[in-house]
């Protein structure tokens, strides 16, 4: 760890440790607004990520296509997400987290409205690729911003409160889709998912603040940083002529991917990437294919979409409880418990009578879907907590963004290989998914000693 001064201040300038200032700041309206905006952005993200899955049963019926023909649509969106997460994360380390969050929300809203106007699977594939550029970046950018905005003692809680938005958006999306799609058709879910992000643009631009740690690395932003710290501390103790610095691990001269691949960061980065890839592969099997899978064994469209609602409900509970427990001394033990629950419940789903006996909707399946959502989505929050703690400020948005980008290729693979998994028996399919989450367990175990 070493102090990083972005510039040479005037002689006699007072040195100010920005990290210490953040740690000592009280919880203010500024913090509440940042968490609320991050929560809303991620709710919209969680809604739109699953929009195609909610629309899929109606789409296949309306266009008279087989469910396998939707795989390119799912895959194109995930490719866009992979590109968006890595590219916009890298740009955020140069231009700021706030600006790139604005760009992602704009892409998200505009792309979703274009999807509503699609007339063919090919058009929907193209428009979903554009939407994916916006879908991929909100989570890594929001977590990086919240991590750099919060005091150390509350960092995991702030990130967890923001990340509740993903399963909450999916939960709301499933409930809304149950009402909209049968009544107004599949385009309605994209219209709804497009207008809401556009309505958030103005509050986001005026209400969200930039990361203080990002500003501390830019001498030209000293006045903006001083004003922000004064607002956070309800004082006038800081001025533009102070010498702001941050204390953290040394960063190689070259940032970006080359910085992550140096001898210090390469092994933990690769472990993090493998965990992100594996967990998102499983998450997107549920996000993209669960309604289709449930409909294939005789459940009605509302029952199939209800399965997604239950999975997202479990995810919401998992993220909330993981966020709370992450601030206690039992955090690491609880992290492994959450991942173990995911492994056990994935195996359990494959043994349910709805698949083995075609018994129709069962209460055991409902509880297993809730528990699987708890474990898999809780594990996703754990990985973001690990990522934001692992990297210093100069690499954080890039590191978290690239990890998220790699994870989206796990999502791409879920679109490509999801059809092959669906061709297996449910017992085999869910046993494979449980084994894949085992990779998350091992990678998380290996990352423990690298955390600061």
Image (cartoon, rainbow, N blue to C red):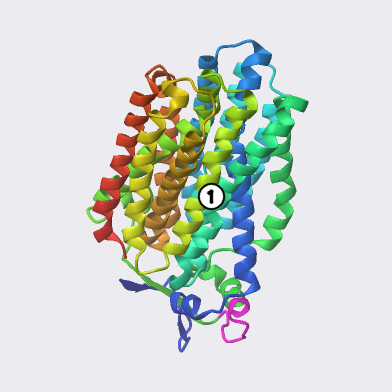
| Residue 124 occupies quadrant | top right
Q: The residue tagged with tag 1: helix, strand or loop? A: helix
Residue at 52%, 67% in the rendered image: 149
Identify whether 315 is placed above or below 326. Answer: above
Q: Is residue 327 visible?
A: yes
Quadrant where the image shows the C terminus:
bottom left
How many neighbours does mark 1 have within 10 angstroms: few (below 14), some (14-19), or many (20 or more)?
many
Quadrant where the image shows the N terminus:
bottom left
Residue at 35%, 69% in the rendered image: 329
Identify whether 353 is placed above or below 153. Answer: above
Name of the residue lying farthest toward the left? 263
* Range of residues picked out in magenta: 230-240
Residue 128 pos. (x, y %) = 59, 29
Residue 174 pos. (x, y %) = 63, 37
Q: Which residue is mark 1?
A: 316
Magenta segment's dominant SS is loop
The residue lying toward the viewer, choosing from 438 and 23, is: 438
Name of the residue lying farthest toward the top? 64
Name of the residue lying farthest toward the bottom? 12
Q: Magenta stretch: residue 236 in it?
A: yes
The residue lying toward the viewer, choosing from 345 and 290, is: 345
Residue 90 pos. (x, y %) = 46, 49
């Amino acid at each position: 760890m070493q102090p990083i001064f972005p510039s040479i201040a005037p002689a006699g300038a007072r040195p100010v440790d920005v990290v210490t200032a953040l740690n000592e700041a009280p919880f203010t309206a500024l913090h509440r607004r940042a968490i609320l905006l991050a929560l809303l952005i991620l709710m919209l993200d969680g809604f739109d990520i699953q929009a195609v899955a909610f629309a899929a049963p109606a789409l296949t019926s309306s266009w008279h296509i087989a469910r396998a023909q939707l795989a390119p649509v799912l895959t194109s969106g995930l490719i866009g997400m992979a590109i968006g997460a890595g590219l916009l994360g890298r740009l955020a380390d140069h231009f700021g987290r706030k600006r790139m969050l604005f760009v992602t929300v704009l892409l998200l809203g505009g792309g979703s409205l274009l999807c509503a106007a699609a007339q063919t699977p090919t058009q929907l594939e193209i428009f979903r690729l554009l939407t994916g550029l916006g879908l991929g970046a909100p989570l890594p950018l929001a977590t990086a911003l919240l991590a750099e905005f919060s005091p150390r003692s509350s960092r995991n809680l702030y990130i967890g409160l923001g990340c509740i938005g993903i399963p909450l958006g999916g939960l709301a999306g499933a409930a809304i889709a149950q009402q909209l799609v049968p009544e107004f058709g599949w385009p309605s879910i994209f219209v709804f998912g497009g207008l809401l992000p556009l309505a958030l643009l103005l509050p986001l631009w005026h209400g969200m603040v930039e990361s203080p740690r990002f500003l501390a690395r830019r001498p030209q932003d000293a006045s903006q940083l001083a004003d922000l710290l004064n607002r956070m501390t309800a004082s006038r103790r800081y001025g533009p002529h102070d010498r702001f610095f941050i204390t953290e691990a040394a960063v190689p001269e070259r940032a970006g991917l080359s910085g992550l691949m140096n001898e210090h960061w390469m092994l933990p980065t690769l472990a993090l990437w493998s965990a992100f890839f594996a967990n998102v592969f499983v998450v997107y099997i549920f996000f993209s294919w669960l309604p289709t899978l449930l409909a294939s064994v005789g459940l009605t469209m509302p029952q199939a979409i209800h399965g997604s609602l239950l999975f997202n409900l479990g995810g919401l509970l998992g993220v909330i409880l993981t966020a709370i427990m992450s601030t206690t001394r039992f955090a690491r033990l609880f992290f492994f418990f959450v991942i173990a629950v995911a492994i056990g419940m994935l195996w359990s789903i494959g043994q349910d009578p709805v698949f083995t006996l075609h018994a129709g909707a069962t209460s055991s399946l409902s509880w297993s879907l809730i528990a699987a959502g708890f474990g898999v989505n809780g594990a996703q929050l754990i990985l973001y907590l690990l990522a934001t703690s692992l990297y210093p400020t100069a690499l954080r948005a890039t590191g978290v963004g690239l990890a998220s980008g790699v994870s989206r290729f796990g999502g791409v693979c879920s679109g490509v290989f999801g059809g092959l998994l669906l061709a297996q028996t449910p017992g085999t399919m869910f046993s494979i998914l449980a084994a894949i989450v085992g990779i998350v367990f091992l990678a998380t175990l290996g990352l423990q000693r690298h955390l600061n």
